[in-house]
Amino acid sequence: MNQRALKKIFLDTDYVHRSGTPQELQAAEYLKARCEELGAKAWLESFPVPMAEMEEARVFADGKEILCKGFFCCGSGEVEGELYYMPGLDKVSIAGAKDKIVLLDSQGIGFFPYQDLMKAGARGILFQYGNIHFPNRDIDERDLRAHVVGEERKVLCAMIHSESAVSLVKNKVKRVRIRIRQREYEGESHNVIAELPGETDEWIVLSAHYDSTALSHGSYDNMSGCVGLLGVLEAMKGKKRRYGLRFVFCGSEERGLLGSKAYVRDHEEELSQIALNINLDMIGTIMGKFIARVSAEEKLSHYLSYMGAELGFPLTASVGVYSSDSTPFADKGVPALSLARIAGTNVAPIHCRYDRPEVLSMEQLQKDIAFIAEFTRRMCQAAVCPVAREIPEKVKKELDEYLFRKRKEQ
């Protein structure tokens, strides 16, 4: 794919396409059309996602209102309590949360910390977003995820800017009140599926997510991965394939891998026919290190390192779990890996207004796609896929921790 064609895709999708919105569907239909133009059969598969329409979100600190964004799907109502700044999630800190409005240093919260805060009796949670040294005062929109709440109660949650958070602590604010009114409902997101059949009924599945966060245009995270899939599709469409190639453009990854989780759930009977999952999440930046995170046997990480040396393509390969759409596949026993070019946040920030096409290099993107396409060619033309269909115990342990089945060891 030439640089002009690559650049056009980023320009065509240079808008916010958050999970469950018409803009996300617009991006899905766009990707489907690109797959069809390249000669692949393509279709959309829908799945439900929790949504909300925010009607009112207000935070008052000692009676003075501060700017905020209410968390979607955290319920409606009003709660007041003493402010409790909690920089850590240790047991000692959590023990002091009873009847308090807790202010965290983070932009979100995982399952076990949320469970701990609820058991400790926290009344509400404030999160913070942004940088006090940046000229803008953006506040991100997040949701209280169902898999974080689990069987516990919901509490009202809101996001404030870091400048406001610093002010609350510095001025020793005593009382905080959170008021939220919202209409919660079940919405719809989509996975885009495209296929290049092979000689057998077995598949190699390539995945990448196309949704963005509420402030981001998602060029780097992760339209770059989607462009990578299109590049591999173009490179492989005229070549002999023993294994078929299935391309899955996942929706709603930014809300907890919802698209890939829906895919492995809805295609559970077919998972035994998937030899390997190759996931792309952020490639093609001007600067940055290329990595491979392998949720499969260690031999695959060595293979990738050797292949990089053979082709003069520097990369760092390791075994473990990557926080992306490869994880649901590995959790179902499908050998999986994620490929990414990781750039520093000062060079290519994500989940913010600065994730735009300008952080990408079309030349580097071509090089990344060429490497990924060659790896894909070797796998799909193999007489037998060389990757063993087994997940190492080390990876299983990380999967249990990542998916909140076990608390991470300290």
Image (cartoon, helix red, strand yellow):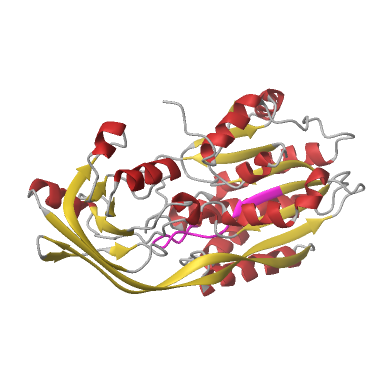
x 48%, y 59%: residue: 212
Instruction: Look at the picture and state if 7 lies above or below 132.
Output: below
Instruction: Look at the picture and state if 408 lies above or below 120.
Output: above
- Left-right relation of 386 to 332: right
Residue 60 image position (x, y, % from top left)? 16, 64
Residue at the farthest left position: 171
Towards the viewer: 1 or 392: 392
- Left-right relation of 34 to 351: right
Q: Quadrant of the N terminus?
A: bottom right
x 58%, y 29%: residue: 397
**Rendered image quadrant of residue 301:** top right
Point out the stretch of residues depicted in magenta.
206-218
Mostly what secondary structure, the magenta segment?
A: loop
Towards the viewer: 9 or 72: 72
Residue 185 image position (x, y, % from top left)? 49, 72
- Left-right relation of 88 to 218: left
Instruction: Look at the picture and state if 54 lies above or below 104.
Output: below
Residue 370 image position (x, y, % from top left)? 68, 43
Q: Is residue 315 visible?
A: no
Q: Is residue 86 visible?
A: yes
